[in-house]
Image: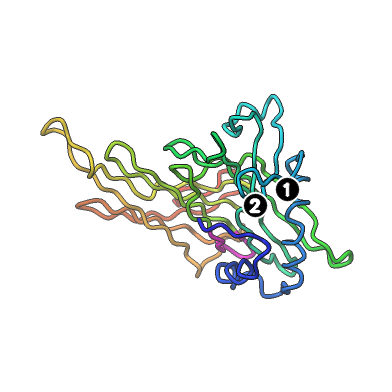
């Protein structure tokens, strides 16, 4: 994923490409106001010790507590280092909002660890714009959304609408291991602030070498779309997943239910 740094005007231009359908009421000044608070936000949300340039980046240096130390977040100096990765601006009704994605990388000898299982830990925060106070306020914060990506890198994160006033983040990730290729898409609902569904969108073992004639080369892909022509009683679009195998295609329709999330439609 491309890294955006708040001091550059290019940051705002780039973000508008991703969020052009979601933030028409939010002014450039209001966006710049949130972005100018980057270091304050980092220090506040992560109980920061300082803003560090140890790795040639503006990161908040913080000390995980006993519980947090069980997460794969600390570097070789026993501190965690978190940077602001991406900001999206969007609207729910007439409320101006922003979602901020943070990445915590692990470092050894001041270099980010690069391996299959060293993807950065992702944190997610949402903000609302207070029209009376004319300032952005923290709404919700998920410090340990999880890891995301492969070989120590974040893959793609985009903002999408999956229903009436239902704005979500789509996290795309994948990796290759021993000749097998995997990818998945996780849908994260910003209204409910939780994962709605993770779909394994691709698997193949075309790079492997079967040990016997009984073993087969496999390739399975899934396409995800939302039916924007219908909104159910909860305000969500139906989810349509098309599974494509070598000799078959299967279409399944999922509907959103309050307690279960997206489930196969009867």
Q: Is residue 96 above or below residue 67?
A: below
Q: Residue at x 60, y 60 (%)?
A: 4
Residue 238 position in % (x across, y down) = 49, 59
Residue of label 1: 42
Q: Is residue 93 above or below residue 74?
A: below
Segment colored magenta: 158-167
Residue 225 position in % (x across, y down) = 44, 61
Decide which of 266, 77 is in the foreground and name it.
Answer: 77
In the rendered view, does 215 fall on the left or right side of 154?
A: left
**Badge 2 local density, few (<14 within 10 Å), some, or many (20+)?**
many
Label annotation for residue 224? none
Label annotation for residue 84? 2
* Main SS category, magenta section: strand
In the rendered view, does 216 fall on the left or right side of 125?
A: left
**Badge 1 local density, few (<14 within 10 Å), some, or many (20+)?**
many
Q: Residue at x 50, y 54 (%)?
A: 255
Q: Is residue 117 above or below residue 266?
A: above
Q: Is residue 245 inside the magenta stretch?
A: no
Decide which of 79, 181 is in the foreground and name it.
Answer: 79
Disc 2 element: strand
Sequence-wise first label, 1 or 2: 1
Decide which of 237, 64 is in the foreground and name it.
Answer: 64
Q: Residue at x 83, y 63 (%)?
A: 135
Disc 1 element: helix
């Amino acid at each position: 994923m491309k890294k955006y740094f708040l001091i550059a005007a290019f940051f705002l231009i780039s973000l508008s490409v991703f969020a052009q359908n979601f933030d028409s009421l939010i002014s450039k000044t209001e966006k710049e106001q949130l972005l100018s608070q980057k270091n304050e936000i980092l220090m506040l949300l992560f109980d920061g010790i300082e803003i560090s340039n140890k790795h040639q980046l503006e990161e908040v240096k913080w000390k995980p507590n006993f519980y947090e130390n069980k997460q794969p977040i600390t570097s070789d100096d026993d501190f965690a280092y978190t940077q602001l990765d991406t900001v999206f601006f969007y609207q729910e009704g007439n409320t101006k909002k922003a979602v901020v994605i943070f990445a915590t990388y692990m470092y050894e000898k001041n270099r980010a660890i690069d391996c299959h299982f060293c993807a950065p830990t992702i944190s997610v925060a949402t903000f609302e714009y207070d029209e009376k106070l004319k300032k952005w306020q923290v709404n919700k914060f998920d410090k340990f959304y999880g890891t995301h990506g492969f070989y120590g890198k974040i893959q793609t994160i985009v903002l999408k609408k999956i229903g009436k006033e239902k704005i979500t983040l789509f996290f795309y990730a994948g990796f290759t291991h021993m000749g097998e290729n995997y990818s998945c898409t996780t849908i994260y609902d910003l209204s409910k602030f939780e994962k709605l569904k993770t779909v394994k969108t691709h698997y193949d073992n075309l790079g492997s070498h079967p040990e016997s004639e009984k073993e087969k080369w496999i390739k399975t892909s899934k396409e995800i779309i939302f039916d924007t022509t219908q909104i159910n009683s909860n305000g969500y679009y139906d989810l349509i997943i098309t599974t494509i195998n070598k000799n078959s295609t299967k279409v399944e329709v999922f509907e959103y239910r309050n307690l279960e999330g997206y489930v196969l439609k009867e």
